[in-house]
Image (cartoon, grey):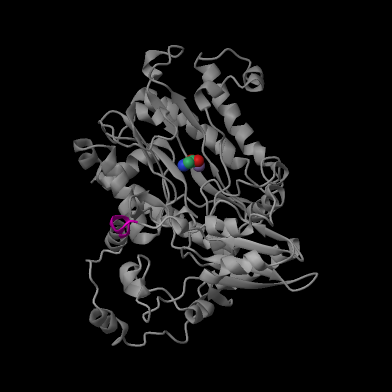
Amino acid sequence: MADELTPETPEEEQAKKKHKQRKNGLYPGVSEELAESMRTGWADTELHGLEPIAQAAHTAARRAALSARFPGERLVVPAGRLKTRSNDSEYAFRASTEYAYLTGDQTENGVLVLEPTGESGHTATVYLLPRSNRENGEFWLSGNGELWVGRRHSLTEAEQLLGLPAKDVRELAEELTEAEGPVRVLRGHDTVIATALTDKVTKERDAELRVYLSEARVVKDEFEIGELQKAVDSTVRGFEDVVKVLDKAEATSERYIEGTFFLRARVEGNDVGYGSICAAGPHATTLHWVRNDGDVRSGDLLLLDAGVETHTLYTADVTRTLPISGTYTDIQRKIYDAVYASQEAGIAAVKPGAKFRDFHDASQYVLAEKLVEWGLLEGPVERVVELGLQRRWTLHGTGHMLGMDVHDCAAARTEAYVDGTLEPGMCLTVEPGLYFQADDLTVPEEFRGIGVRIEDDILVTEDGNRNLSDGLPRTSEEIEAWMARLKG
Ligand code: GLY
Ligand code: MN
Ligand code: MN
């Protein structure tokens, strides 16, 4: 408003113009001749006869299930927009899980809209940025023009790839503002879309959409299981890479480990699925140690918790706690073997029909037993577990659903997840740990500063479970033999 009413001084106008030009990376003074030159002389690069992406065979069924859950309502699921890192630099873009799950697309600004066709049924349309306009100079004068950020698919190409109609997203906000009837939006990803819908949506109704989209992903289909296995397989290779460069990490810092794993993630996948935890020595007792700027010392343990995210956005979540020298000390082995026994009990409890909490309870019981056996807690074990006394050193839950998000399906209702029953196709982590803080005066000195976690990705099958990450050794002896082999 103020902008319209207050005339700009020539200085202000000049400053604004300069800022805009800097943002576009242009020098001042684009002549009409240059503008005309940039308009023409470009080949037609439209691609024809594109094959649908692999996810397209599955996304239609997912949209149909969503449609059946919310008949007669307009549903809006945005991918999200670029987020500023600093000044005019942006963070790497990662589409919202829900949008990617329903469309297979991962481009910024994309929005899926399910338009009700009556009392039941919807028409799905994906709204995208089209190719950049060359006529008005957008393709080279605008910050998100293709000359700067790379070629996008045309809407026709996107339709072939995704298997659903595509429209220009720049027209969507206005369409939504004018639209009538009930609407729900997936919040938190796109402020432009959220603003267009402010007067039409409620928090409670939007929360139901979010909950549905979490619960719909609890059981994975064959395609998803295949992608999770790919994520885990790349992760296994990333762990092997790390073992091979431990001497370089010793000469530098935990960052060398982070960088080594990241290289594998970027070369074979999209990214890491979460910030890698590369925790050497006492850092292993800090659950989310992602600063990764500490020393790596022979004689200490390295707790490496890392996962590759595939190009289709499925992530692994694996932890191994390795002796940096290649051999566990007696106290390290004692703690490691206890965590291993706990994980074994947890994995054995993962089967169809079991409660989700069972594997947590089984793992915790074993850890409590060990803590009593070592004299750190007074028994009986049942009392310890009932009062949760072991938690001073076990700290976190024993696992979570895994999928496109590392902590997958987080908006699911308690009854559909934490208080639910395991079914074939669910994938979860089993990740018990023991953590003795360096300043914990309640444990003997030799325990202090030691943290151990073992984490595997477990698929519930018809008759039990399958460990997707069994490409990595788990027992202390197997770990030592594997490290000796890799270190050569
Ligand atoms: N990497 C996070 C977790 O294990 O849950
Ligand atoms: Mn983890
Ligand atoms: Mn985990």
Q: Is residue 243 above or below residue 283?
A: below
Residue 17 point in image, percent of width and height: 30, 62
Q: Which residues are magenta?
A: 9-13
Is 383 situated left or right of 390 in this image? right
Residue 241 point in image, percent of width and height: 30, 50
**Residue 12 part of the magenta segment:** yes
Q: Is residue 256 visible?
A: yes
Q: Is residue 397 above or below residue 120?
A: above
Nearest the eye: 169 or 274: 169
> Residue 390 falls in which quadrant of the image?
top right
**Residue 473 part of the magenta segment:** no
SS assignment for the magenta stretch, majority: helix
Is 257 situated left or right of 130 in this image? left
Is 334 situated left or right of 463 in this image? left
Q: Is residue 152 above or below residue 79?
A: below
> Residue 417 falls in which quadrant of the image?
top right
Residue 349 point in image, percent of width and height: 63, 40
Q: Is residue 163 visible?
A: no
| Point 24% across, 73% down: residue | 30
Nearest the eye: 178 or 204: 178
Q: Is residue 297 above or below residue 205?
A: above
Residue 321 point in image, percent of width and height: 39, 36
Nearest the eye: 118 or 20: 20
Q: Number of numbered discs present?
A: 0
| Point 45% across, 26% down: residue | 435
Nearest the eye: 161 or 205: 205
